[in-house]
Amino acid sequence: MKAGSNVIVHLRPAPVVARVASRTALVRPSVIDHFGRDLAVSAFLASRGVPVVTPSTELPAGPHTHDGFVLSFTTYVPHDPSVELSRPDVLKMLPDLHAELRLYEGSLPARGPLDDTDNTLAYLTAQGVPGLSPFYERRAELLALWDAHYNDVQPLHGDPHYGNVLMTPSGPVWNDFEDTWRGPVAWDLACLAGAAGTEAAQRAVDIYGGGAAPSDVEFHVETRILFGTLWGVLIENS
């Protein structure tokens, strides 16, 4: 079992993994839609021959609501959790994934990380958590610049870090499309830049092979830092 944003349970001995919304349900009023997109995008990519974790065929994949919890079922993929790809390795895999995602025609949100930031701020404010003013100010600063960096828009993975790539005997397998949204390619690169600043952004673009302006990647790293810091506050207060 793994517990973090969601609770992940391998239903041994069945080749089924249950995903149950935990903290994500606190700040995503539409968490069932996120789970549904994960299943839909994964099924689409699998139909295209992309190595992904697929919706379960042993149980109805869902998403389901039970006793107030949102959950889904996916196929268990044997893998070695101690083996993780490097950021450069994942960046080199992204162009092929993006090429397939461009063909996805399902409905996707257009403000992924902004919605998460707004929803998290709203939740923390409702809980009476103090000291949120700097987060609201930084959010306003980034929002004012958002449109200028909303370029090269297409369906994205949304959270393509190395923890979302499973290492299997037959090679890497993509996992967790819960954060998929229609946004700039620079966002996915920002998830793998590894640091703030121009140098890290340029390195991510170079490894990926172009496709985004380093200035856009640098901006989205800052957006990701804002949400990541907010998530830390959420963990402390939930």
Image (cartoon, helix red, strand yellow):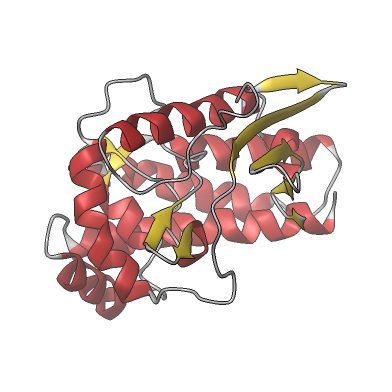
Percent coordinates x, y for residue 39 in the rendering: 50, 30
Q: What residue is rendered at 49% in x and 41% in y?
A: 179
**Which residue is nearer to you in this view: 22 or 18?**
18
Percent coordinates x, y for residue 223 in the rendering: 45, 54
Judged from this view, the residue extending furthest toward the front is 13
**Which residue is nearer to you in this view: 23 or 57?**
57
Q: Is residue 131 visible?
A: no
**Which residue is nearer to you in this view: 38 or 122?**
38
Q: What residue is rendered at 32% in x and 46% in y?
A: 145
Left or right, residue 10 beside residue 197: right
Percent coordinates x, y for residue 139 in the rendering: 51, 47
Percent coordinates x, y for residue 17 in the rendering: 66, 43
Q: Quadrant of the N terminus?
A: bottom right
Q: What residue is rendered at 34% in x and 52% in y?
A: 187
Q: How many marks?
A: 0
Q: Classify 105 as above or below 42.
A: above
Left or right, residue 236 beside residue 108: right
The image quadrant of residue 45 is top left
Judged from this view, the residue extending furthest toward the left is 210
Q: What residue is rendered at 86% in x and 42% in y?
A: 128
Judged from this view, the residue extending furthest toward the bottom is 199
Q: Is residue 59 visible?
A: yes
